[in-house]
Image (cartoon, rainbow, N blue to C red):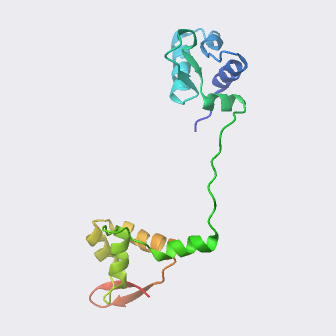
Amino acid sequence: MPTPSQSQHAILVAAAKHPKRDVREFMTHIKIRAVHEKVFQLLLKNGWIEEKPGDPDLAYHLSDLGLEIAGVKLEKKIYTYPKKPAAEKKAVAAKAVKPEGKETKQQKVIDMLKSKEGATIQEIADALNWKKHSAQGFVSGVLRTKLKLTVTTKKVDDRGLVHRIA
């Protein structure tokens, strides 16, 4: 999130103290029209102010983000979800469940690596229409790290490095 300049911050703070919270009243100190317009557009672009089309007296007021930057505390509802125990998370990750009726790319790679022949990184990349570095990252990042699967590597003369799930 971009941080406001001193001038923008001063405008947001002044508008936050005003009951209407309209920023136009607090931009009168900017005399050069082009600078005034640029500051205004940046406030709008960054989401610090928002247009209120139904009220002509209050066309542009501070958004929640603008109020937060100005230091106004907002009451927001925070939704919390029950946390799963760490053991349950690992068990879910290790299962590598595939949705019914649809074979995922993850499942295709696991099936290739569980086969007797195993698979090279290039074979995985070709089968899934991936680049070689993406296949390598998937094997090390998802299979080994996230799913905690044991992937063994063995050099085969005619194929190169062949990976298998032990």
Which residue: 63% across, 28% down?
66
Please count the marks in the image: 0
Along the line of sight, which residue is nearer the eye, 79 or 13?
79
Residue 4 in view here: no
Along the line of sight, which residue is nearer the eye, 101 or 48?
101
In the image, residue 29 sits, relative to residue 99, either above or below, namely above
Percent position of residue 122, x then y: 30, 75
Percent position of residue 97, x then y: 43, 72
Position of 128 compared to 28: left or right? left
Along the line of sight, which residue is nearer the eye, 20 or 109?
20
Position of 51 compared to 74: left or right? left
Residue 131 in view here: yes
Quarter of the figure with the N terminus = top right
In the image, residue 87 sits, relative to residue 162, either above or below, namely above
Percent position of residue 166, x then y: 44, 88
Percent position of residue 70, x then y: 69, 28
Which residue: 61% across, 55% down?
81
Q: In which quarter of the image is residue 156?
A: bottom left
In the image, residue 142 sits, relative to residue 164, either above or below, namely above
